[in-house]
Image (tube, rainbow, N blue to C red):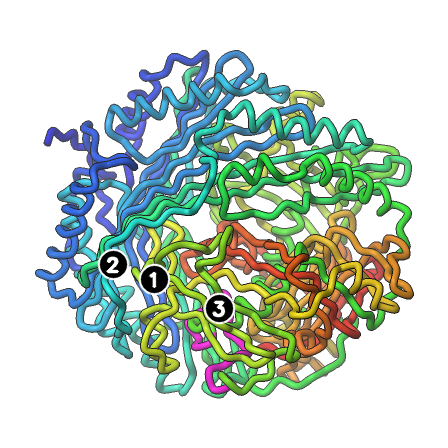
Amino acid sequence: MILNEKYAKALLEKVLAFSNADGVQVNLRGSDQTNIRFAVNTMSTNGFSDGLSLTISSRFGKKIGSVATNKFDDSSLNEAVKKSEEVVKFSPDSKEYVELLGPQTYNPFKNFSETTSKWFEGQKASDELNDVISASISNDVSSAGFLNNDISFNSILNSKGLFAYSMSSDSGFSITVRTKEGNGSSRVEKRYVNSDSIKVTELSNRAIDRSILSKNPEEISPGKYTVILEPAAVADMVSLGLNFMGARGADEGRSFFSVKDGGTMIGQEVVNSKVTIYTDPTDELAPSNTFTSEGFPRSKTVWFENGVLQNLHRDRYWAEKNNQTVIPYPSNIIMNGTEKSLEQMIAETENGILVTRFWYIRTVSPKQMLLTGLTRDGIFEIKNGKISRPVKNFRFNESPMNILKNVIDIGKAEKATGSENESMQMFVPVLKVANFNFSSLSDAI
Amino acid sequence: MRRRNFIKYCSMAVPGAIIASKMPTSFFHNEKSIHENYDDEFIKRMADLAIETAKSNGASYCDFRLSNFRSQQISTREATVQNISENENFGFSVRVIVNGTWGFASSSNFMEDKVTSMSKFACDIAKANIKLQRARVELVPTKAYQDFWQTPIRKNSFEVSIDEKVNKLLSINEKAKSLGASFCSSSFWAVNEWKYFASSEGSYIKQDLHRMLPGFQVSVVDKTTGKFEERNSLAAPIGKGYEYFEEYDWMGDVEKAVEETKMKFTAKSVEPGKKDIILDPGNLWLTIHESCGHPTELDRALGYEANYAGTSFMTTNNLGKLKYGSDLINLVADRTQIDGLATRGYDDDGVKTTEWHIIKNGLHVGYQTTREMARFIGEKESNACAYSDNWSHIPIQRMPNISLKPGDKKLSLNDLIADTEDGIYIIGNGSWSIDMQRYNFQFTGQAFYEIKNGKINQMLRDVAYQGNTVDFWNSCDAICDESEYRLGGSFFCGKGEPGQVSPVSHGSSPARFRKIKILNTSKEIE
């Protein structure tokens, strides 16, 4: 359910009026979500959901407790406020207490498009999907995928007068195409704020072509290879790398970014000097929310500039304690690219492996930032500037920081979605990386 | 009924999908509309209304689900409470089949006119998508049930004071710090999933499910070397009440955790190569989950998860033929297992839960099914594996508790270690990853001990084991008896689009696997 700013504020004010606490913050979120899922060349499920939810955080002195509900009649709202106050009474003082924020100024949100709310109206999306299924049948492949169209709003009001409101839209299309014999697979996914940017037919055709190219992969030995990582693979590595970039863990000595005898790597050249990565919620390349759940304004933060670590994310408590700047966890990630196309990068590679995407990535060792995972849906050998043959999937054991350190070349950047962090808005390039560690082979296709 | 019209964002038409009609613009009101202890009669009337509306709009099948997911989360670190929250998420959904096509609509706004409009909307969605349905949806039969089922808890977590829980968590942290831990965080998470199911076939089922996830993590930092080590609690999430939190030996676990964390700094770095390994139930549950649970999901094996979770090497043409493991291996699916996270009376298709073999004496003999999927392998009925994690999500096939049967012969863990010449004993689950068809996996643990000549010799570090599912299970040559049996599990098994999580348990006794590939993780990126 979507409430406009006026009605969201009216509801938040009503909730606030029920409060007897020293301080209170109320977060109200709502969404309308529609989706169609298909597999084995037929629709499998679909659905519509409208939801509205409220979180009330009450404070007495330095005690805080919160209650979430989605019951909106007056008595339920009053009951939820009282319950949050009851929860507080049983809480000890928070030793990491920070005051509620007062009114803030936010950048205007750019992650909402009116167009997206209309994508699933009428028969447009359904017709597009019908064409995809027909094309899959005529190409003798099996397609599975997902179309979604989500509209949401997010609002905050607190007893110190902070009010924030934003809307967002997210339209997505993903398709996995498997050959009939199960000996080839490919996948394409795109997510945009504006559904007009999603070219369903073009993306499906690309996936169908790639699946045929990936047929009958051959075995090559695991080991260290020069790889070209397509943006979906880069998106995983960069976003997972940023998960480790908390300032507190680094200051406390339990992070990859901690240094011996205390301190952090800020200011050091941690990755290749070609690498610049930043967050900017207002950047049209991958727009995102302009405030945090506390109502703290998000603005541009550079994480790496020409390879040098510039910032680690730091919450309000840790920033106040250490007299440092608050740096919210990233809401989007943008990595600078070049004009070089994927095809050019392949053409300039004598020996290498082209990786479409990764799968099931987990941390093996936080102090090394060592991750394991697998390649999936298209991995190819490159010989003398050309794709020479599809090869079997690998398990890797690698570190995102190692990858960014070993960058040889950077290609064109585009909107990308990884397999592990779908909600993060990302705009990242193709990367050519030396010495990527493939640990073993997988028979999976 | 008095209403106040909170008008929707004015120009925003409901994403039509799929669709035909637009939704009403009034969305909530000021009167008490629903509560978790709401009158049974009213709920039944709403269910009947949804079903009758669907029938009159062309549905050959309809089910109505109303659910309230309540959770309480407390998290602490050292002497600080970081978060205390109580969450309730209430709503309903209507699922229909019209002309062999699914339609699904849901809302958090449980009102009579909303029930009617959502039921009609589900039918409209189905009708608008008939052209996409290249194979008709048909359900295998089930009996109609009128029943109430409840997790057999002794003490309701939600009726215990928050300060008691906070004090216990802080005492764990304090103990860890007093023993030399640099940091300790601990948490308590209780869930009460209340749900009501009614179908056009005459079922009216109410269920009250409870589960909990308590735990801690100890960290020790050596600032002089810039190194740090960690160990998590070995407590498992479980389908029990507060009694589990009260009875678990937290002080014993935290003492051992600090001791083992300190030992890791000086532990021997493992020599990579092929080794025999003994997996403790706290580690083996996850290996069962990933390498047996997921590949035997029938929807996955048929390609319905190809775009997200993947497919399966355990294809239907190999059912009854694939020698999945050694003769000792009996993996049994059981949605009635005591304390299991996936234990309940009925699934979200309204089918009564049961138990059955997935692997029998090493042979693949069974899949997990729903009413929609069962017929694809010629089954006449479903084994009750439909689940939706939220009123807003359509039920899909989800994993039951799947457990490894203990060995028939008397065999303790000590006996098994004594019988092992050169191996590694692995405790607790650490990192885990497996490919999209469930062949190649890599797991770590919380602690590793070298076994030499039948005795625990010393602690090891940097250990990961890699394997291929069929080779791995065929290498199992010993399973301890039922006296060593324990449950492990997960609150958050992910699957589906939009993504859903489900809770699931896996039990086992310690088991030995021969000649498994061991990696030294510290040398992987040297």
Which three-letter amino acid code belongs to the residue tagged 1?
A: Lys
Task: Specify the principal SS of the magenta part.
Answer: loop
Residue visible at 67% across and 24% down in the picture: B79
Q: What percent of the width, then of the height, locates residue B50?
A: 16, 52
Which three-letter amino acid code belongs to the residue tagged 2?
A: Tyr
Q: Quadrant of residue B54?
A: bottom left
Height in image: A285 above or below A59? below
Residue at numbered disc 1:
B352
Height in image: A373 above or below B492? below
Is residue B124 on the magenta stretch? no
Q: What percent of the width, then of the height, locates residue B309?
A: 50, 66
Q: Quadrant of residue A359?
A: bottom right
Q: Which residues are magenta?
A: B301-318
User: Badges 1 and 2: C-beta atoms under 8 Å apart?
Assistant: yes
**What's the chain of the residue with tag 3?**
A
Residue A169 visible to an observer of this rendering? yes
Q: CA distance from mark 2 to mark 3?
A: 44 Å
View extreme (front): residue: B410
Q: CA distance from mark 3 to mark 1?
A: 39 Å
Residue visible at 66% across and 57% down in the picture: B483
Mark toward the viewer: 3 or 1: 1
Residue at numbered disc 3:
A188
Q: Are marks 2 and 3 on the same chain?
A: no
